[in-house]
Image (tube, helix red, strand yellow):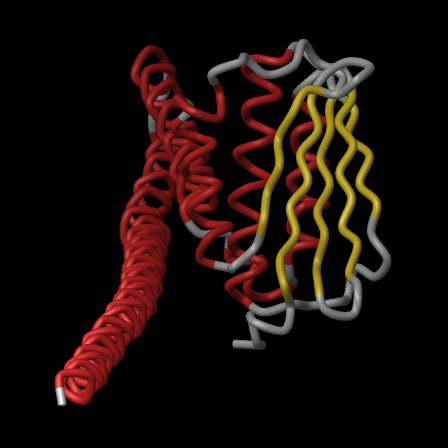
Amino acid sequence: MAQANELNFLFTLLTFAGVVFLIALGVIVLNQNFKKNLYRQMLKNEELKSIHQQDLLTSIIAAQEEEKKRIAANLHDELGATLSISRMRMVQLEQELSGENKTALQSIRGMSEIAIDSMRRISHELMPYQLEMFGIVKTLQDVIKKIEDIKDVRIQFHFIDDQQRWPASIELGLYRICMELINNTLKHAEAKHIHLQIDPLDDVLILTYRDDGKGIPENYQSDGIGFKNMQARINTLRGTMTIENDTASGMVASIKVPLTFNKLS
């Protein structure tokens, strides 16, 4: 009888231990699943946050470009027209005057012509109309010609087809980046040559820029406002950009923009 009681006790104890083990195992499994689900949720939240930030950045840049377009149109259509009419009136008055009065008026007309040229340049920089009409290749060709006319720097521009067009967002983004790179070279690099190349592939557009100047400072990518502006534009296009000092001299930048994501607009 005692032996039977011991067996029953052992059986009960083993059964209880088995139940406890199963409960513990279940708790461990549930805890692991909870951690996995929590990790997946965190990843999903981060992804949604990244998407939200990306959409916000895209909206900000789009709003900035729309405001630039509006200001450029007002400068060209309103202020430009007013200055042109004033200049025409001064030309008429010059024909009626003589002596010191005519000389003074000619001086004022000269200043008005400088103002007209400045207004046109600012308007063009804010929103280059030919970019929308003729595309980035022809627009950059025109920019390069003007730079070479006034600066002691030679620019080589390689492309396949000057008639080829890409989505407006890509052309505007790459144009802004090119102008930032060119301005940096002209202001700081003391370069004599610039090489610019656009290579369209099946699913990506590659822009390569290099100069033979004194290179970029070490903290340029972390502290430079110009770099951050360029990087922001690249991010809105889901592209990539690298800027570094060349092994020989100067700097080299490579921008890659996916054409599959940025559809024609």
- The residue shown at (21%, 79%) is 10
Q: Give the camera-side residue of 112 and 72.
A: 72
**255 horizontally vs 248: left or right:** left
**8 horizontally vs 178: left or right:** left
**Residue 37 image-quadrant placement:** bottom left
Asked if 160 appears above or below 193 in the picture, the reply is: below
**Residue 155 image-quadrant placement:** top right
Asked if 165 appears above or below 3 in the picture, the reply is: above
- Where does residue 35 sit, x and y in percent of width and height? 28, 65
- The residue shown at (44%, 52%) is 127
Asked if residue 59 shows in the view, the reply is no
- The residue shown at (64%, 40%) is 143
**70 horizontally vs 157: left or right:** left
- Where does residue 47 sit, x and y in percent of width and height? 35, 64
Asked if 258 appears above or below 146 in the picture, the reply is: below
- The residue shown at (58%, 58%) is 171
**Residue 252 image-quadrant placement:** top right
Q: Give the camera-side residue of 4 and 105.
A: 4
- Where does residue 239 sit, x and y in percent of width and height? 57, 55
Asked if residue 35 shows in the view, the reply is yes
Q: Can you say which quadrant of the picture contains the N terminus?
A: bottom left
Q: Give the camera-side residue of 105 and 224.
A: 224
- Where does residue 212 sit, x and y in percent of width and height? 76, 17
